[in-house]
Amino acid sequence: MDKKLLDILACPLCKSRLIYNKANQELICRADRLAFPIQDDIPVMLEDEARTLTTEEADALYK
């Protein structure tokens, strides 16, 4: 994920910053507890395509 692209991307729902999860190829929104997939190096920023984080995953973001 290009650092410049990550700096300008925001959650399409709440407009908060996103966290890049390289291992899962996802962009994570802490506020909405959603993970947006990255497919073929392109972030898919659609609510319908995002998965909801588990409680454990969301809690781990704050550690």
Image (cartoon, grey):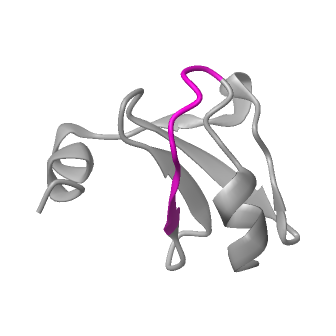
- Magenta segment, prevailing SS (helix, strand or loop): loop
- Quarter that holds the N terminus: bottom right
Give the x, y percent position of residue 48: 71, 23
Q: Is residue 56 positioned above or below 5 on the image?
A: above
33 magenta-colored: no
Quadrant in the picture for residue 5: bottom right
**Residue 46: percent from left, percent from top:** 76, 30
Q: In the picture shown, does residue 27 fall above or below 6? A: above
**Residue under the image location 68 percent in, 28 percent down:** 12
- Residue 18 falls within the magenta-colored stretch: yes
Percent position (x, y) of residue 30?
36, 40
Tally of numbered discs: 0
Relative to 39, say whether 28 is above or below: above
Left or right, 56 with reference to 25 = left
Q: Where 59 sits versus 26, above or below?
A: above
- Left or right position of 11 against 53: right
Query: In which quadrant of the rendered view does residue 39 lie?
Result: bottom right
Who's the residue at 79% across and 46% down the image? 44
9 lies left or right of 51: right
Relative image position of residue 19 (x, y in whole percent):
47, 59
The answer to whether residue 29 is visible is yes
Magenta extent: 13-20
In the rendered image, is residue 1 in sight? no
> In the rendered image, which quarter contains the C terminus?
bottom left
- The residue that appears at 61% across and 20% down in the rendered structure is 13
